Amino acid sequence: MSPQEAAQEPAHTPRRSKITPERAQEFYAAVLDMLRESGYEALTMEGVASRTRCGKSTLYRQWGSKPELVVAALHGTRRVLLPHIDTGTLAGDLREAARAIGAGSGRDTPLMHALSHAALQSPELLCALREALILPEIAAIEAMVRRGAERGEIPADTPAAEFVSAQLLGVMRARPLLEGKFADEAYLTRFVENAVLPALGLEASTP
């Protein structure tokens, strides 16, 4: 933001809520798409304004700065997929979780990579990233494991139980770095069958 723009947009100017929820979602989608394409450093308010065909002053008036807009986009597009999974068995839940995480890996992994470095420099951005993409999935996976223990499928003190979410979410981040490929549905399903279920003492499906 140039000094001239700063003069036109005082820091304490009250923000006006003229943007509809539908229009806000358009801004959020544009922000996340641009992050996936070019990364956080390359993202600019000018670029978002150009892509969404709005005035740059509209964005500054509504969100104030790039970090605030990114945080709003993360919060405003939170997805809740894994909490709805409940097949009645822990193995079934983890297989469905693998499919759901794998289906979104091409969308979520680039976004997490794009924001990881910037998030380490910004507690607010890190918190928004965790709340939008990480914590809901961790909580859902831990709930699956807890239900499995309550049903007696695994002992409550199974050592591997506390690492299930780290395994599933960690391999999603690691595979692009190690192999140059996303951890898609097929890969994560194999990972669950051959690494996660055996560690929990559960029987894998017959290939």
Image: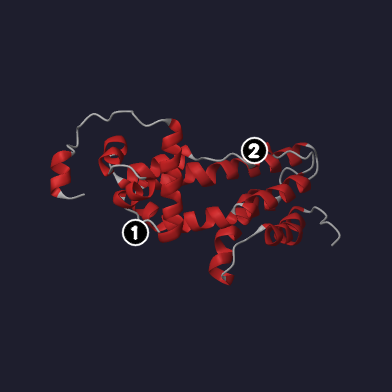
Which residue lies under the disc numbered 1?
A: 42
Image position of 49 with respect to 178: above or below: above
The percent position of residue 54, horizontal first and vertical second, equals 33, 42
At 20% from the left edge and 32% from the top edge, which residue is drawn?
Answer: 13
The percent position of residue 106, horizontal first and vertical second, equals 57, 57
SS at badge 2: helix
The disc label shown at residue 83, or none: 2
Amino acid on which disc 1 is placed: Ala
Quarter of the rendering containing residue 37: bottom left
Image position of 130 with respect to 16: above or below: below
Circle 1 residues within 10 Å: few <14, some 14–19, many ≥20: few
The percent position of residue 10, horizontal first and vertical second, equals 17, 37
Q: Is residue 15 visible?
A: yes
Residue situated furthest right in the rendering: 206
N-term-proximal mark, 2 vs 1: 1
Question: On the rendered image, what quadrant is the C terminus found in?
Answer: bottom right
